[in-house]
Amino acid sequence: MIELRSESDRLQVLQDKMQEYIDNGTQLGWLIDRKQHQVFIYRPNTSIEVLNNPKTLDGEPLLPAFVLDLSQVW
């Protein structure tokens, strides 16, 4: 699941939505905050991981060899 924050989105609302997806069975979620250049990574039964200004995201182990280049997002 990928959620991209737009200028009008409230971060807390999106974070709550991402947690709901994880609680309902989603195995991997990326909340991309273009405004702050952050990515929040959601996985079941783990703490939320926060990356500051990453260049790429990889989908390992769920999406082998999948890499998202964020240079066009920032």
Image: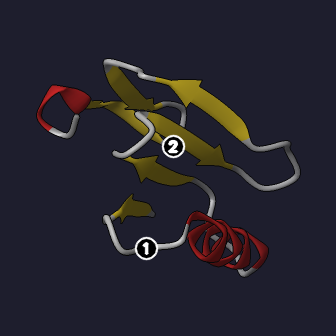
Image quarter hosting the C terminus:
top left
Label 1 vs label 2, nearer the camera: 1
Residue under pointer 1: 9
**Residue sitting at x 31%, y 18%:** 55
Front residue of this view, candidates 48 and 35? 35
Crowd rating for badge 2 (residues with CA inside 10 Å; few <14, some 14–19, many 20+): few
Going from N to C along the chain, the mark reached first, 1 or 2, is 1
Residue under pointer 2: 62
State yes or no: discs 1 and 2 in contact (Cβ < 8 Å): no
Front residue of this view, candidates 26 and 36? 36
**Residue sitting at x 70%, y 50%:** 43
Q: Find residue 3 and report its image quarter.
A: bottom left
Q: Residue 66, percent across and down?
A: 30, 34
Indicate the amino acid at tag 2: Leu
Q: Residue 68, percent across and down?
A: 26, 34
Above-or-below relation of 8 to 55: below
**Residue sitting at x 65%, y 33%:** 50
Q: Which SS class for mark 1?
A: loop
> Which colour scheme appears in the figure?
secondary structure
Q: Find residue 44 and report its image quarter.
A: bottom right
